[in-house]
Amino acid sequence: MSLKKKVLVAGASGYLGRYVVREFKERGYFVRALVREPDKLKAVGPNGEPAVYDMIDEIVIGDVTNHESVAGICNGMDIVFSSLGLTAPHPKLTSYDVDYLGNKRILDQAISEHVSRFIYVSLFNQDKMPGIPSIKAHELFAAELKQSGLSWAVMRPNGYFSDMGRFFSMAKSGHIFMIGEGEKKINPVHGADLAKVCVDAVEGECREIPVGGPDLFTFRETMEMAFDACGKKPWITSLPFWLAEGGLAVTGIFNRNLSDLFSFAIEALKFDHVAPAYGTRHLKEFFAELAAKVH
């Protein structure tokens, strides 16, 4: 690259965001990172994602739910990458506030700055779960992006290794409650492998890119593998969907945001998530790395 291209990475402290920062840096880009808590970038993440603080050329501390704090965020940028989204229940904010409105604040500025490409991370199988609030918010934004006049790519990963890391945490405690029989299949992708596909997406036509990893498992197999990595005998209790959905309705009365996130987890277990395979990193090795950190 003769002239150093500049990229804004929104969601830079997240699981995927850190790998994307590293991938852009390794390919010679100038990286501006938008984060709320820059100190998070200084330590290795809970799922082994890299500490990238020292790789970043410019850190902007801002909150996409506050318009003033992200003013000028796209100034001078060639590319915008966003994996920004609400990943845990928040007492005041919803997926609509962050995944849709927050990303839209970035997009509006990207349009006025005439960035050459906007890469957005949504999710796979969105058409099978249209009623889930977080998916609605992601897809509202994806639709805005497609109509923006900018060159775009929408990434559709089917599940991160960090999502599987939650099974590992439960296995470590000795017991997993599983909704359904766990017979549906998934080929989740490692953050580093997904980051390569995301950065490759800077080039080419406007398109949606579904992404999975190299190995296919049932949900039950991923849980058994997590127990195996912990050196524990699998103890998995299967709960019927009707029971989980009943619990969800009760949760919704007291905590709408928690209920919205749970609704995705329940719905996602009802069908296969098999996406085109990319990458070389394997879930078994990822679980072994998590286990090594524990011992």
Image (tube, rainbow, N blue to C red):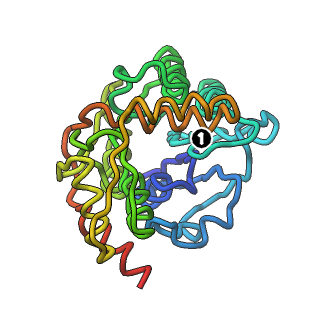
Q: Amino acid at mark 1?
A: Leu
Q: Is residue 51 above or below residue 160?
A: below
In x, y percent, where is residue 9? 55, 47
Q: Is residue 98 above or below residue 191?
A: above
- Of 73 and 294, which appears nearest the observer? 294
Tell me where residue 201 sits by quadrant: top left
- Of 281 and 168, which appears nearest the observer? 168
Q: Is residue 106 visible?
A: no
In the image, taking residue 248 as reference, residue 126 lies left or right, namely left
Q: Residues within 10 Å of mark 1 (few under 14, many from 20)?
A: some
- Of 26 and 144, which appears nearest the observer? 144
Q: Residue at x 38, y 39 (%)?
A: 202
Q: Secondary structure at mark 1?
A: loop
In x, y percent, where is residue 221? 22, 54
In the image, taking residue 277 as reference, residue 54 lies left or right, namely right
Q: Residue at x 31, y 39 (%)?
A: 180
Number of disc labels:
1
Q: Is residue 233 visible?
A: yes
Circle 1 residue? 86
- Of 10 and 176, which appears nearest the observer? 176
> For the C terminus, which image quadrant?
bottom left
Q: Is residue 193 above or below residue 85?
A: below
In x, y percent, where is residue 116? 48, 32
Q: Residue at x 53, y 46 (%)?
A: 7
In x, y percent, where is residue 260? 57, 32
In the picture as drawn, the residue positioned furthest to the right comes out as 68
In the image, taking residue 108 as reference, residue 212 lies left or right, namely left
Q: Residue at x 76, y 37 (%)?
A: 92
